[in-house]
Amino acid sequence: MYRRVVAAPLRTRALVQARPSPALLFSNAYRPAASALPLARVTIPARAVHARAISFGAIPRMMARAFRIPAYGAAVGAGGVGYANYKFESVRTKTAELFGELQDTVSSAYNTTADTLSSAYDATSSTLSSALDTTSSTISSLGKSASDGINGAAAEAQSRADAFRQGTQEWWDAFTTQFVKNEQSGSGSSGDEDGHSGRGPEEPQNNGGGEEAAAVAVAAAVGAKLEDDRAADPFSDGSGPEHQLLQLTRKLIEIRTVLLSIDQSDALKLPSIVVIGSQSSGKSSVLEAIVGHEFLPKGDNMVTRRPIELTLIHTPVNKASSQPSEYGVFPDMPHLGKVTNFSQIQKTLTDLNLSVPAELCVTDEPIHLQIHSPNVPDLTLIDLPGYVQIASMDQPENLRESIANLCEKYIREPNIILAVCAADVDLANSPALRASRRVDPLGNRTIGVVTKMDLVTPQQGAQIIRGEKYPLHLGYVGVVCKVPPKAGGVFSSIRGDSNTTITSQVMKREEEFFGGENARVFGTRDRRGKRLLTGTDTLRRRLMDVLETSMASNLHGITNAVQLELEEANYQFKVQYNDRRITSESYVAETTDALKARFKDYTAQFTKPAVRSKLTNLLEDKVMDILEQLYWTDARAAELTTLGDDRKLATEEDLDSYWRYKLETASSLLTKSGVGRDSTNMVADGLRGLIDSIAQGEPFTFHPEATDRIVDFSHAILRQRMGLTADQVENSIKPFKYEVEIEEREWARGRDRADAKFSEEVKLCDAKLGEIRNRLGGSRRLNGLIKHVSDLEKWEEKRKNKPAPVEGEETTEDPAPVLDAYRYSPAQIIDGRHALLLSNRLALLKMRQQAIRSKRCRVGPDQAAFCPEVFLSVVAEKLAYTSTMFINIELLEQFFYQFPREIDSRILYDLDRDEIKKFALENPKIRQHLELQDRKDKLEQVMRSLQSLANLQQADAPSGDRRRKDGLFAKFM
Ligand SMILES: Nc1nc2c(ncn2[C@@H]2O[C@H](COP(=O)(O)OP(=O)(O)OP(=O)(O)O)[C@@H](O)[C@H]2O)c(=O)[nH]1
């Protein structure tokens, strides 16, 4: 169906024309000089070697296809010669038609062939002469009539085209080489390219004549080369029509995979081959024979529970590459990578199947597996759970129905059905055939595979695959897929035997079974005159052909559907995203940039004045605590205010040492209160709050894991810096623990701040008192309650201070102020106690505020003992100032430097491709954007592939059209 045109070099053509015609060669008259041949080869230009890779393999294959010449025919002997005679007639007629097409190819291939033959002749030069003599005498003994026949056939061919002669010359060269070889070895191969033995009873058994010899020779040359080619690469990737066919199938399989990843709608589906059959009918054995490895789950406990979508990808052997040429890939589990061990593939498949709970038993969630191998054809196959007759006790009741529904879903159009039936079970009972008939009554897309042919007699087997009882348009193929047991009863398999695949073992066994004596039975034809199809190899090739044809016939519909989907996707992309393309990577980069920018904005809260002010507030709160602890609770507190008003006391030196020590204690309490730790904690808490707030805003609400990461690493930075910072701060304020020098200006500022702080405190107390007042219902009630609580406390005090009673003396108890007890609830009593405290505190605060505002406190730092509030406020400010400097250097600057870098390294660079993708898809808006973009891209990719397929078909138009115009599956009619 494909034609290649290769221009032959002039010198080569001349050489071809110098060869004798086949007619002459078959006659007794021709006696080639043994020495002349090698001499002739020497003249072939070296560059012609290059042509071998392109065209040498194509000739025998095409010839074999065209002539259907059995390679086995090469066996020299009377039987073989008889068969050759029969074939030669068809050779003679078909060659004339085909040589027109083949001429150019053959001519160009001449260089290569001649080159090959040259070396072959060199190697056999010593025996060539005698071999040719033997040949000639054999031909001679076959009779003159045969010779005439040959001459006639050749003359007819010669009259049809000059080119035919040139091509024939080529074939003669091939023939002579092979013939000599066969003469020497006395052996030949058997079977045609479809795997048939080609030894059917209808074939003539004529044993004599030169025609037979010619046919034997051509068949031998073609067959041997075909076998050579197959051995090198059974699904050749070389040039030539088969290559194009494979390209077409492969491209369609690629397209199918992309389409499946876009969506599962039926409109965008290219066909696949679905394997159905009852349990133990041999489905797995057939698939494994096709793949060449034992890799499917095995076991009694219904181990196939999910559809296994198998994509076989033919990969040519690349000896130079260190990469494995044979491996499996689970696309849904990329972390597994290339699995080269097929036992591992089997284990993974078993685990994936058994992950379906026993109570469910089957599910329609498929497992995807790709197998790359030089030994597999490009195919897509779906293995389904086997039909069961009745569910066992531990299986769900509706199992039969579930499996049937699952198969029903997969055998819908456009899929091709591979209905597997065992030969030893009546086809009438085959659930696979029954299911396929429902959806494909004519069997237009059903291939029957009859397994276990060895379990019935050849006659019965042949009868089944004739398909007369249950006809299928695509027919039946009989196979024997059980791998022969090794000595010791163990099935031989690929494991531990790298040179033998299951395929070769199965093929060997099938060759024995369908060949030999059984060849008479299986070599017959069915009612439509078609050969019975037998053997796994035939099945493989048939599947390739059917899949390719089916896919190609779906091409038009798919192209239209893809075009429509693409237009819609383009429109949506324009409308929704204004054609703006994004990637997961760009989204991550944008997000981290935004995070850094937001972080920078927020850091404005951490300027030095801002931190200083916060620290000052912290320390002033401490000051208030110290004042309360040392002064406000001191019974002599009022005394200090009075002393301050005493004009006789000029400086604090004139003051009672009690107040001077008190001031020192207060100063010490403040400077030794853990300022380093507290101030560092305060700033670090501020930073934590900042990070929490920016990491929780959009878009991080969609990325909980990333948020946790940010929080974790920012906290880690802080933890790392905090100890050091606290120590540094503590060291820096150490001098203030011994001496505090105060300037006038500082004192004045401290006084103002102390005054303000007291005002604040007064306000707070007022507010609290106001709350209690409101709760009680007015000032009168508040005052009454305060008085009552005060009396109560006095009574309690008195009672506490009362001396212990002397034994024997009568004791008298002062009555508690119970009168008002019934007027207040316990909660009000508690409020009353608070109110009493607050009013006392208010009185004190107001008194001390007066002191702070007094003339004395305005004088300056030498009056510090009179005005501890002002002094402590100044110290607090100094501590805050110094602490801020060191916190800024040791903590803030470090954090501001490290945090953005950590964002880059922990989010931007630390994520691998999958994590980046996962991150982007977490954001629903981005996911929609990416999904639409991905869909559009894939549809465009599919459109491009479809376009290139159209080009491929156009390039192949003459033969391709011929086949297509006959309609779907025309080649199998
Ligand atoms: N004699 C003979 N036995 C075969 C042949 N093909 C398969 N078997 C045997 O039949 C049994 C079932 O074969 P499988 O390939 O596991 O059948 P299956 O349809 O995949 O079975 P389930 O996965 O259980 O549905 C195995 O013991 C095979 O060895 C054959 O051509 N001849």
Image (cartoon, rainbow, N blue to C red):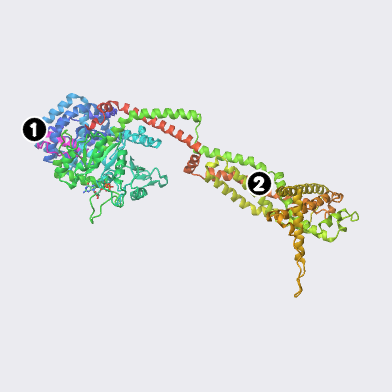
As drawn, the label of residue 144 is: 1
Residue 529, given in percent of the width and then of the height, sits at 16, 33
Give the amino acid at mark 1.
Lys
Residue 507 on the magenta segment: no
Q: Nearer the viewer, residue 404 or 571?
A: 404
Give the amino acid at mark 2.
Glu
For residue 260, above or below residue 348: above
Q: Nearer the viewer, residue 364 or 104?
A: 364
What segment is highlighted magenta in the picture? 194-220
Q: Which residue is mark 2?
A: 893
Q: Is mark 1 within 8 Å of ligand 1?
A: no
Residue 656 seen in the current view? yes
Q: Choose top left, top right, bottom left or bottom right for residue 537.
A: top left
Residue 378 seen in the current view? no
Q: Earlier in the sequence, mark 2 or mark 1?
A: 1
Quarter of the figure that contains the C terminus: top left
Q: What crowding class fits label 2: few (fewer than 14 Cα within 10 Å), some (14-19), or many (20 or more)?
A: few
Q: In the rendered view, does 670 fall on the left or right side of 243? A: right
Q: In the rendered view, does 655 fall on the left or right side of 138? A: right
Report the residue that reaches farthest toward the bottom. Answer: 808
Q: Choose top left, top right, bottom left or bottom right for residue 969.
A: top left
Residue 429, given in percent of the width and then of the height, sits at 21, 43
Q: Nearer the viewer, residue 540 or 268?
A: 268
Report the residue that reaches farthest toward the right. Answer: 648
